[in-house]
Amino acid sequence: MPWAVGVQHSEGRSDYKSEKRCQRTSLAFYQAVRDGLPPWLLEDVRSMEAFHWEADGQARPFSPSEALLYALVHDHQAYARHLLAAFSTAALAPPSGSFRCCGASGAPHLAAAVRYGRVAILKMILAALKDLPTEGERRGFLDGRGGACQHDADGGKTAVRLACDLLRPECLLLLLAHGACPHLADGAGVTPIDALLRAMGAQGGAQGPAEARSRRVCLGYLLLFRPRLHVQLKQRLALEPEQWRRLVGTEAFHWLAGASPPSLFVKAMQTLVRSIPAERLDSLPGFLKPIDFPL
């Protein structure tokens, strides 16, 4: 069977914890997840047969957290569902050092879900956060910089900022609806709104229709979930009003520039998205979904 390539039971093997053998079993486990094998079989391999080699010279089995990262990479939704159901938030713990750039980085699951556009698994992860014991832990996971480390020039980005940079509006809506902060700045002091406006201004008329719409939708989501605006680029908006009116629309321009309050429609939409449970946003009628929010 393909999953058994390089994987054998450890009994009777004196080298089952050698570095070379760990490399073989690690690759075999990775391939097994990639090939979409059943969760029960993957769990047998993970818990009994596959090991990865750590920098401290120790061989360790894959944790549920590390297995979930593989499920995210390969969009193995059944395996992700099993791991989160069986291990709950333990599957969202920081992985071992070999899965992170440095010890300063945290759990990278949200960042991985956004980076690969795994909307279905992202929903599962966000639903599992209800099992965290405190609101502080839940918010810390949502707003943590899972991919951040001492080597990041900007101090790392939150999942919200990553969703804006990669133009993942579905991921962004899920994060914001579950309580992720829409205005946390990165190490350089740049908020997601500032980053979006910079990108829109840099691209100008060179944006393709799909890219321009995705940026506008992401901006609309941030505006819906952010009651007060503190935009770094107000001066630039004032200096280039016609360009920004064309890019974001007249109403959004006046709001971002601080020249007028949000419209009644925007206020109504803000109230709507705060009053509906996050898991029910997808069931809204099309004309009420934030995806149709006009800037």
Image (cartoon, grey):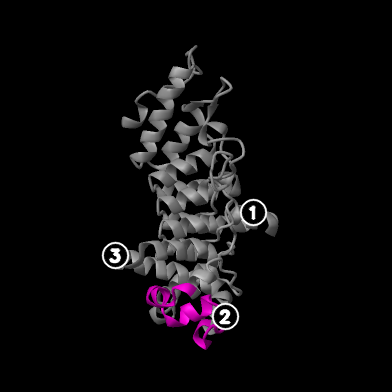
Up/down of 132 relative to 93, above or below: below
Q: Earlier in the sequence, mark 2 or mark 1?
A: 1
Is label 3 in a helix, a strand or a loop?
loop
Spot occupied by residue 242 in the image (x, y as percentages of width and height) = 40, 77
Secondary structure under tag 1 reads helix
Q: Nearer the viewer, residue 34 or 116?
A: 116
Residue 90 sits in which quadrant?
top right
Question: Taken as a whole, is the magenta stretch helix, strand or loop?
Answer: helix
Q: Residue at x 55, y 27 (%)?
A: 60
For the residues carrying marks 2 and 3, which lies nearer the camera in this image? 3
Disc 2 residue type (three-letter): Thr
For the point 60% across and 69% down, the residue is: 230
Q: State the separation of the CA atoms marked 3 and 1.
A: 36 Å
Q: Which residues are magenta?
A: 239-266
The image quadrant where one finds the C terminus is bottom left
- Say if residue 281 shows up in the picture: no
Identified by mark 3, the residue type is Gly
Q: Is residue 249 magenta?
A: yes
Answer with mark 2 or mark 3, whichever residue precedes in sequence. Answer: 3
Using the numbered discs, state the Cα–Cα distance from disc 2 to disc 3 in whole angstroms.
32 Å
| Residue occupying the point 63% across, 55% down | 131
Disc 2 to disc 3: CB gap under 8 Å:
no
Identify the residue at image location x=54%, y=65%. 176
Density class for disc 3 (Cα within 10 Å; few <14, some 14-19, many ≥20) is few
Tell me the residue that label 1 is attached to: 140
Q: Which residue is mark 3?
A: 208
Q: Position of residue 190 (x, y in %)?
A: 55, 58
- In terms of sequence position, does the residue under pointer 3 or pointer 1 come before the other? 1
**Residue on which disc 2 sits:** 271
For marks 3 and 1, give the one nearer the viewer.
3
Separation (CA) of disc 2 from disc 1: 25 Å
The kind of residue on which mark 1 rests is Gly
